[in-house]
Each structure stands twice: as C-alpha cells, then as structure tokens.
Image: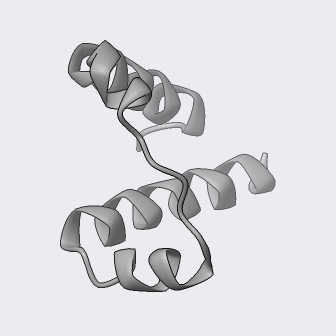
Amino acid sequence: MITAKAALQELLVRVVKNLKPDLITAAKPVGFWGLLGALSDPEVQRGLGIAIALLKALGKQ
C-alpha cells in the first residue's frame, strides 16, 4: 500500500517535471463561473480527484 507521504512525493516530482515557467506567468485569473466550467475538463477532474485522495490520506494519519 502506498503511503500518503510517498504519494505526495511522487505527485510533486511529476508537477515539477511538467511545470513550465510560462504556465504560471500566462495563467489568467479564474472567477466562480470559470471554476465551474473548468470542472467539466477531464484533466481538472483527475487533478481534483488526486488532491482529494491525498487530503483524505493525510487526514487519516
């Protein structure tokens, strides 16, 4: 069974590998309706699912 710490480390490594400087500088502010619209994006759904699973695991420890 993977621990929350190991999962978080793996996630951070993936984020750092895929992080491009222009991704942050080109990011636009998102309002309430933009957030709701983003929830229909499969990549956003997967990311939120991972974040929620990590938070649950951290909460159990």
Instruction: Place residue 56 in its image quadrant.
Output: bottom right
At horizontal 47% and vertical 26% (from top left) the residue drawn is 6
Up/down of 33 relative to 9, above or below: below
At horizontal 29% and vertical 84% (from top left) the residue drawn is 40
Q: Nearer the viewer, residue 15 or 19?
A: 19
Q: How is the image coloured?
A: one colour
Asked if residue 23 lies left or right of residue 52, the reply is left
Q: Position of residue 48 (x, y in %)?
A: 45, 64
Quarter of the image with the N terminus is top left
Asked if residue 43 lies left or right of residue 3, the reply is left
Asked if residue 59 lies left or right of residue 13, the reply is right
Number of dots carrying numbers: 0
At horizontal 34% and vertical 26% (from top left) the residue drawn is 15
Q: Nearer the viewer, residue 43 or 25?
A: 25
Asked if residue 4 lies left or right of residue 11, the reply is right
Q: Position of residue 4 (x, y in %)?
A: 57, 39
Q: Position of residue 5 (x, y in %)?
A: 58, 28
Q: Position of residue 9 (x, y in %)?
A: 47, 21
At horizontal 42% and vertical 56% (from top left) the residue drawn is 50
Up/down of 17 relative to 7, above or below: above
Quarter of the image with the C terminus is top right
